[in-house]
Amino acid sequence: METYLQYLDLWDIIEVGYAKLADWSSIEGEERMRRKEERYQNCKALMELRRGITFDIFTLIKNYRITFDVWRELNASFENENCKLRL
């Protein structure tokens, strides 16, 4: 999954994270465009992560909206498992 997200140029938003803004009214110009692009990348990465998992695993992450949090939850869930699942 990590390689696939790197191929789609989405890995940075997962690795670095995305800070969701509560109020967009104070953001203008280039900063606003940059933040919109980050939001788009987060949504796109979230969609790809959700597409790549089964419904059983989806229930672990269904309430998360930030890809960094989703990735952290998935890693924590399978870190100590005695299974051969690799993200």
Image (cartoon, helix red, strand yellow):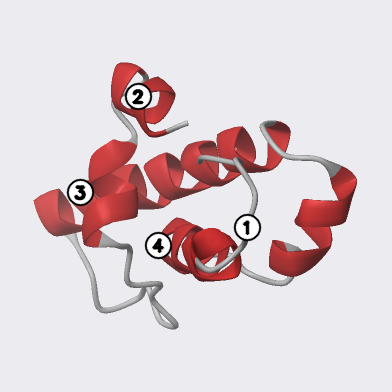
Q: Marks 2 and 1, Cα distance to the nearest angstrom?
A: 23 Å
State the residue position of label 3: 34
Q: What element carries label 3?
A: helix
Residue for point 58% across, 33% down: 48
Above or below, 39 relative to 3: below
Q: How crowded is mark 1: few (under 14 residues within 10 Å), some or many (20 or more)?
A: few
Callouts 4 and 2 close, C-beta under 8 Å: no
Amino acid type of the residue that numbered disc 1 sits on in the rendered structure: Asn
State the residue position of label 2: 3
Q: Marks 3 and 1, Cα distance to the nearest angstrom?
A: 41 Å
Above or below, 6 relative to 85: above
State the residue position of label 4: 68
Residue for point 88% across, 47% down: 55
Give whichever of 45, 58 is nearer the camera: 58
Q: How crowded is mark 3: few (under 14 residues within 10 Å), some or many (20 or more)?
A: few
Q: Marks 1 and 4, Cα distance to the nearest angstrom?
A: 24 Å
Looking at the image, tell me whether mark 4 or mark 3 is earlier in sequence order. Answer: 3
Looking at the image, tell me whether mark 2 or mark 1 is earlier in sequence order. Answer: 2
Above or below, 44 relative to 74: above
Residue for point 30% across, 62% down: 17
Give whichever of 80, 62 is nearer the camera: 80
Amino acid type of the residue that numbered disc 2 sits on in the rendered structure: Thr
Q: Disc 2 or disc 3, which is closer to the eye? A: 2
Q: Marks 4 and 2, Cα distance to the nearest angstrom?
A: 16 Å
State the residue position of label 1: 82
Q: In the rendered view, does 59 fall on the left or right side of 65? A: right
Residue 81 screen position, x and y as percent: 61, 63
Q: Is mark 2 on a helix, strand or loop?
A: helix
Q: Which residue lies furthest to the front in this view?
A: 82
Callouts 4 and 3 close, C-beta under 8 Å: no
Q: What element carries label 4?
A: helix
